[in-house]
Every structure is written in C-alpha cells, then in structure tokens.
Image (cartoon, rainbow, N blue to C red):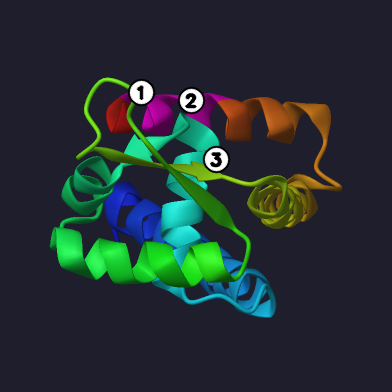
Amino acid sequence: MKTYQQNTEQQLFQILNSYHMKSKELEKSAGLTQERLQILMLLVIQGPKTINQLAEGEKVSAPAITRTVKALEKQGYVIKSRSKTDQRVVYVAPTRKSQQIIESIRSKQKKLIAELVKGHSDEELRAIGLGAGLLVKRTL
C-alpha cells in the first residue's frame, strides 16, 4: 500500500513531467535551442549581464557563451555594448524581439497551468492553492 507521501510524489512527478514536455514543445516552436532560450529568459527577467555573468549563471565557459551570444546577436535577439568604465567588459542586453518571444512563451506556459486548474470547485482550488503554497515555500 502506498503512503500519502509516495502517492503525492508520484502525482507531482506526473504533473511536472507533463508540464515540462508541453513547455518544451512551446519552446521548440520558437525556433531556438534550449541553451539560447535559457540565456534570453535570463536576460529578459534579470536585465543586461556581462559575458562572464552569463557564463557563470549557465555554468559554461566564457568562449562558449560568446559564441552563443554572437549567434543571438546575428538573429537580432540581443545587443552587445561595452562598459563605459571598463572597455574590456561587454554587456549583453535583450532586444524587443527577444522580450516578445519570451513573453509569448511565458504566456502560453501560464495558459497550460490555467488549463490544469480549470473546472475545479472553489474548495478544490483552495486546497490546491494551499498545497502549492507549501511547496513554493520549500523552493525559495
């Protein structure tokens, strides 16, 4: 007999796995690699970063990030600029094009979640919200 914990773990795994697969399909439809989308997401959410900050955040080498940024720049997704105080430092910022694509993906991801909770009673939604709230506290 499964315990409540095992049952909950299995159900959460199924939800996360399903969401992840659907989310990957949305991201794939953008026509960018996961690596490039991850960098755009970071830049759109957190703002401009240096090449070194991106490399550290993505846990890859600066030359690897530089290649990716060059490709994104060529596609019109990012712009590079040099620091006014130190010309050796290069900042990478998202363009309006990258903001639009990330906003579109995030909007579609939110719709996936809305579909998941659609049709539940207020009592069920309250229980889902309480449970989700407990899990969110653990992830922060």
Q: Which residue is mark 2?
A: 133
Residue 16 point in image, percent of width and height: 47, 61
Element under disc 2: helix
Segment tinted magenta in the rendering: 130-137
Task: Examine the rendering and report whether any part of residue 23 can be seen.
Answer: yes
**Location of residue 58 by image quarter:** bottom left
133 over 112 or under it: above or below: above
Spatial CA span between label 2 and label 3: 26 Å
Find out whether the residues at labels 1 and 2 contact each other: C-beta distance under 8 Å.
yes
Q: Residue at x 75, y 54 (%)?
A: 104
Query: Predominant secondary structure in magenta?
Result: helix
Q: Residue at x 55, y 73 (%)?
A: 24
**Does residue 136 show up magenta in the picture?**
yes
Quadrant in which the C terminus appears: top left
Extreme right residue here? 119
Question: At label 3, which amino acid type do we have?
Answer: Val
Element under disc 1: helix
Q: Which mark is residue 15?
A: none
Whichever of callouts 3 and 1 sits on the residue coming sooner in the sequence is: 3
Task: Examine the rendering and report whether any part of residue 60 can be seen.
Answer: no
